[in-house]
Amino acid sequence: MIVVHHLNNSRSQRILWLLEELGLPYELVRYERDPKTMLAPKALRDIHPLGKSPVVVDGDLVLAESGAIIEYLVDRYGNGHLKPAPGTADIQRFSYFLHYAEGSAMPPLLLKLVFQRMETAPVPFFARPIARMLARGAQKAFVDPQLKTHLDYLEGEIGKTGWFAGTEFSAADIQMSFPVEAASARAGLDESRPHLWNWLRKIHARPAYQAALARGGEYALASPR
Ligand SMILES: N[C@@H](CCC(=O)N[C@@H](CS)C(=O)NCC(=O)O)C(=O)O
């Protein structure tokens, strides 16, 4: 039985969704973030030394990193579903977006989160205006322009076929859900980018997405519906 080590409100929601799309049975082991630090509990390090989620265990295999997990599950259990055919241009896009999601899209989104938190972080009152000024300055000068470039790019890409890797829904859409959802939560993605917005609505309406939400519990990024 596939076991998913699942942290609330996290990237592991993607893995539950993929397993629901594939109709595979799985066991869920739940971990809760520390409400103050938002970090995972130490128990997750017993499963994988980095202590991050998702981690999937399948027999002797212990696999971390969402992209690698998605690739493994689709190749091992997908029977050709959720992945474009070998040798096509779409398979290159599939591979590209599996890597792009965590390698290129997430770093500026993570910086945005860090600087947003820095604006309201509990620091001594005399340091507060400085912390706020630095955080806002970094967002304005560096992070926000980067995010705009990514969102403009993605709006153009998704506008081509409606999905990230060809004319059909694939596991690349699952991998891309987290950065696009994070962008709608913290980087100003809204209806003004209609192709991305419509794509979000489409993925959120999928029965397997809803089934994964019901199984995984709280997931703050599941809007719009
Ligand atoms: N690139 C990794 C990132 C894993 C990651 O950072 N997971 C977050 C959840 S979204 C986590 O476990 N955070 C808790 C912590 O760092 O303690 C992946 O895609 O799996």
Image (cartoon, helix red, strand yellow):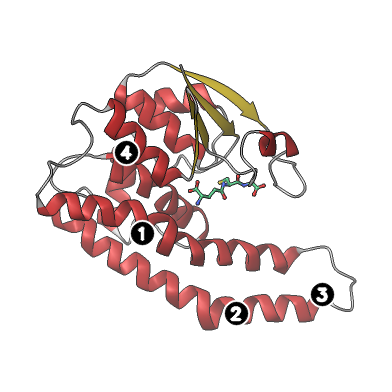
Q: Residue 138 carries which label?
A: 2
184, 94: nearer the viewer: 94
Give the CA separation, mark 4 to mark 2.
32 Å
- The quarter of the picture where the C terminus appears is top left
In the image, what residue occupies the spot 67% across and 36% down? Answer: 44
Please, which residue is most extreme toward the left here?
88
Q: Position of residue 48 (x, y in %)?
A: 61, 39
- x 47%, y 59%: residue: 106
Residue tagged 4: 203
Badge 4 amino acid: Ile
Q: In screen coordinates, is 187 left or right of 160?
A: right
Dot label at residue 100: 1
Kind of residue at badge 3: Arg
Distance between the Cα atoms at labels 1 and 2? Answer: 23 Å
Residue that appears at 47% across and 22% down = 59
Q: Which of 42 and 204 is in front in this view?
A: 42
Describe the element under mark 2 as helix, strand or loop. Answer: helix
SS of the residue under disc 4: helix
Q: How packed is label 4: few (under 14 Cα within 10 Å), some, or many (20 or more)?
A: many
User: Does residue 194 sit above or below 145 in this rendering?
Assistant: above
Q: Earlier in the sequence, mark 1 or mark 3?
A: 1
Q: Residue at x 70, y 46 (%)?
A: 39
Name which residue type carries label 2. Ala
Q: Which of marks 1 and 2 is nearer the N terminus?
A: 1
